[in-house]
Image: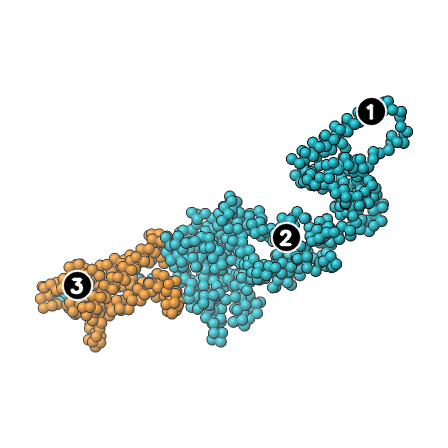
Chain colours: A orange, B cyan
Amino acid sequence: MKRVFLHPLTVRIWHWINTACFLVLIFTGLQLRYSEMPNLTKFKTAVDVHNLFGFLLIADFLLWLGFYAITGKIRIYVPLDLKKFLTGAIRQARYYGYGLFRGEKNPHHATADDKFNPLQQSAYFMIMLILMPVQIITGILLWDIRRFAGWISLLGGLRVVDIAHVAVFFFLSAFLFVHVYLTTLGRTPLEHIKAMFTGYEEVDENGK
Amino acid sequence: MRIYAFEKRVRKEAFLYIFLFMLMTVLTAEVPALPQSVEAAPPPVIAKAESCMGCHASNDSVMQFSNKETMSVFVDQKEFSKTAHAALLCTDCHRRVFLGTHPGRVIESKKAFTKEASDGCRNCHRDDQLRKKATHAAIIDRPDAPLCAECHGGHRVLRINEWKSSLSGKDYCLMCHRQVIDTTLASGEKLSLRIDPANLASSVHNKHDCSDCHTEYTRESHPIKMFASSREHSISVAGICRKCHEDKAALVKGSTHYNLSFQVGETLVRQGNPKAPVCTDCHGFHTVGPKTTYEMMSGVPCRKCHEDIFRIYAKSVHGRAKEKGEHRAPLCASCHFAHEVNFTAMTDKIKGACLGCHKGIEDIHNKWLPNAELHLSAVACAACHVPAAEKGIALQLIDQDTGKPFTREQILQLLGKTSEELTELLDAHGEGLTSYELFYIVRQLNRKETGAKVTFLGRMDIMKYSDAHQLSLKNIAIRECESCHSKESGFLKRVTLAVLRTDGGMDRYRAQPDAVSSVFMTLSSKQFYLLGGTRFALLDWAGMFVVLCGILVPVLHITARVLTAPLRRSPKAEDLHKGDKS
């Protein structure tokens, strides 16, 4: 067994702030959209908190983007070799849907430069580089619809922007369940979660 | 003070006469009696008049009536001597004037005194004699007939024609028009032609001559005008006002009142619509007061027609402040404007009126209300500040680029329909417009050939405009966001399509409550969206499905892992099991 450094401090800080923002934004977002249903907090509090954590999320996203852009590590999110990606994705899907139940080993071996398996890579690519920007932009537009009336009109109107924001909200909420579940599929259920605090993960001597 | 001096002089003279009388009694006791005819003869006229004139020659003396009116008691003896009555004694006419009680008797009013004096005329000028003259015969039996002195004067009694020639300006006209005179119009209504000189004197036009306004009336010309009704007369008079007050007339042109009375209304009024006010309905004819008259609760002319609204206003925070003497508190014209009176519903005008007094209102709202500026543009002040009012959403068809609402006429033009066809379209089945019907209207308006860019804008407004007048204290205004931002909000239960008329008013057509949260509204309403309120169900269901899938993935995977656990217990599988990763 050896310890591999997977998560730099900046990434760990980003991740946990992101987690807090996601949870707060999901609950306040639910309160805003379904104010007549569970009365967790007052609407006004929900608005203020949603706005505050929205901007915190944006700042956190910029931290993530800055870190990965400056270090050049952003390529770990981008499937550069399509053929390798496709075969890897099929292999990984087979593992989750079949091999795992038979007790096979995970075909992907995480290193600092190749942290994600192809399924993770495509999911995070979509989330971080497409959905998050969409959510951030629509969120900013909805934050002050009067100031951004021109942009909103350009995007097809207020309701289109709202639908996009809400649709991404549903998708990210759904993904949260999958994401948390997958973190428990390490050597021990808490291994990956611990790694996100310490930065290190234990792997076999031969890297497996 | 002069009255006292006058009484003092009279008392002095009275003592003198009593002394003379006693002296005469003593002397005549020694003198043989005069012939009877000499004893019965009246005292010399000159002597009597002179005794009256001792006081009445002074033009400083005034008489005060019990109703506080005053009147000069000066008699111009020179003028009097030229009249037909020069030979008469004062007491021939003033029969109730006796030395013992005069002065001192208090008379109720100037009118009562004039009547008493005029009764003196009737001692000689008997009814049968008066009836011989048509003008007298026409009025003699009327209880409100003018008194002799009112037309012919007091001491300088003249024929009407003689009087008129000596009068100038207003006095010439008032010679007749201060009397109770009227004319019967074709409609059967009586139009009073009387002008109260006191009212005229207190009006802002008191420096004008009658002919300044009534230009066609001169000493030589007095055309007899015939009006079908008093309404028609008022409209005609409004034309006179416009000669000087063109600026106000221009403002009135854009008003609801104008549209009612002149534009459509020249016909409407002639058809008998009495509701459209013209100048005189608010300002009166000869009693036009200064601006301050209309700025008091008691002087608001709007009450004449809008008493029901005024009663609501009187109970409002503004009405109560005004009643307490707060001069800055708004009255009708403060919001609706005095001449350019207009519908205020959902126009920026009314908001302008509120913000005109309530400075810095955006900052005040900004302290607690997120997106205050947006709220102030989309929510009528009354929607929050009249908590009890029934509220709803008013959808308006606006130009996507300019934000200006389309008027009914513009909509008709774009649709190529008649007004009746539009009404039919907007109220087809009596159950309220569906979301598709609303979408259809926008689609029709945005046809390629129209070149228009129409979209719906929704505003939160009160349903009954009268409610807007009962604005409350701000501490009981609605502050809970949930009042609007909820699917259960009362706003969402009442949805109307508000079509702006050219006159500034709104025609409202009911829409079905769920129309605003339909997917069709996404296509037809690019600028209206109510957080928490206008969400459409399809997206909610789709979202629930996605989240459910997210939950099902781990649930099913865990289930599969539990079910397949025996497979992994074999030694071979245990060896393979190391190194799983998310």
The residue identified by callout 1 is B25
The residue identified by callout 2 is B207
Pointer 2 and pointer 1 on the same chain: yes
> Which secondary structure, mark 3?
loop
> Callout 1: few (<14), some (14-19), or many (20+) C-alpha neighbours within 10 Å?
few
Give the chain letter at badge 3.
A
- Residue type at the position of mark 1: Thr
Residue A34 location (% of width, % of height): 36, 57
The residue identified by callout 3 is A7
Q: Is residue B493 visible?
A: no
- Left or right, residue B178 beside residue A200: right
- Give me the C-alpha separation between circle 3 and circle 1: 144 Å
Residue B485 location (% of width, % of height): 40, 56
* Circle 2/circle 1 CB separation < 8 Å: no
Q: Residue at x 76, y 32 (%)?
A: B99
- Left or right, residue B481 beside residue B59: left
> Callout 3: few (<14), some (14-19), or many (20+) C-alpha neighbours within 10 Å?
many
